[in-house]
Amino acid sequence: MKKVTTYLIAVLIITIFIPTVIVKTFNFEPQLSSAEKEDYKENRTIDGPGKKEKSNSKSKKDKDIEYIQVYNPDTKKVNKIQLEEYIKGVVAAEMPARFHIEALKAQAIAARTYAISRNKKYSSGNPAHKKAPICSSTHCQVYLSLEELEEIHGEKWVKKYWGKIGEAVDSTKNLVINFDGEIIEPLYHSTSGGKTEDAIHVFATDSPYLKSVDSPNEEEAPKYKENLTFTVEEFIKIINKEYKDVKLKKDNFFDKIKLVEKSPSGRVKKLAIDNTMVSGSDMRDLFELNSTNFTITYDKKVNLIEIETQGYGHGVGMSQWGANGMAKEGKTYEEILKHYYSGVDIDKM
């Protein structure tokens, strides 16, 4: 009988007492990655779901997106700027403030998305400016402070438009453009000339959201079309100076220039000049053209070459003048962005 009693006591100790001691001694936490552990420490609940431990500091993730480091190539300094204030300066610098409010909202979201995508991609510094992930020049996207804007445009401009720009940015706060759950790099330009370009034809990199789309209602853009005129001698001299193997002469030059390839949107991809292959982008740079959507005509009677261009900029992504045209027709910022960036969603950060 004593053996049975001893046995029962042993069983009770093993099944009840020891587990109770173990549970009270060890604090079990879920198996998480390093990033998840940091998030768990900040947000773990006490007394049930929805009641967070009190903390006076924001999470690291919140701090990362509250400010942005911007390199100024003129001063060679890095400025730490509150993100939404930075977006206001970009919208004011990149798009005419007189544009429709929905176009300005679309620009604000595109600018914010671009800044955050740069910050994510180049968190340790952009190869072109290693002190910061983004700069204030056209290399990234132009940013001007309120003081700089007032110096350029004057006090009347600030009184008339700064509030409007603030409304466009504040009303879209924290909104970014995503494709398949990932933040995009939303390129944009001034004027497409009627049709935007597929990224692969400009940057040799395919992108599912940077596809060619129609862009009507751009005719009001000051650089929708432009004509440049050269004498035959000027035209030949510019080409021969750049391409040493090319021997153009007045009596044969036009026969030696051949169009090799155009993109589906009508932009020049390749030209053959006396057996030398020249890209449309190189011709654009050489003659300081507004875009690669150009045609060259020769009027032998007056000895003149005319180059006509359509659009202004690389033509990829959102056309700013096209966005304004859509807004004036009643389209919202979301409709504008989803037109120019294929298959995207507009989400909170």
Image: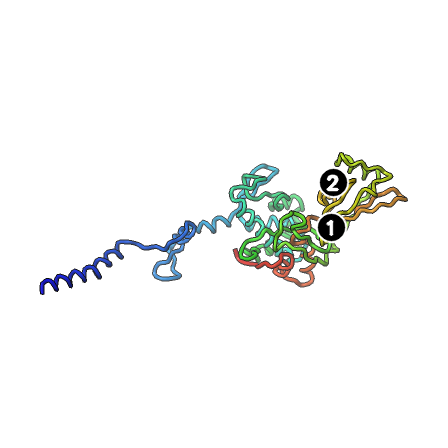
Say which of 330 and 289 sits in front. Answer: 289
Circle 2: is it few (<14), some (14-19), or many (20+) Cα within 10 Å? Answer: few
Look at label 2 and name its amino acid.
Answer: Leu
The label shown at residue 262 is: 1
Report x, y in % for residue 194. 73, 56
Residue 227 appears in view: no
Image quarter (top left, top right, bottom left or bottom right) of the N terminus: bottom left
Report x, y in % for residue 239. 78, 38
The label shown at residue 284 is: none
Report x, y in % for residue 163. 61, 54
Residue located 74% across and 49% down the image:
261
Q: Is residue 74 left or right of residue 256?
A: left
Say which of 70 and 252 sits in front. Answer: 252
Residue located 83% across and 47% down the image:
297
The residue under label 2 is 286
Mark pair 1, 2: CA separation:
18 Å
Residue that protrudes farthest toward the left in the picture: 1
Q: Is residue 246 above or below residue 30?
A: above
Q: Quadrant of residue 103?
A: bottom right
Circle 1: is it few (<14), some (14-19), or many (20+) Cα within 10 Å? Answer: some
Q: Is residue 221 left or right of residue 71?
A: right
Q: Are marks 1 and 2 in contact (CB under 8 Å)?
A: no
Residue 293 appears in view: yes
Report x, y in % for residue 84. 55, 51
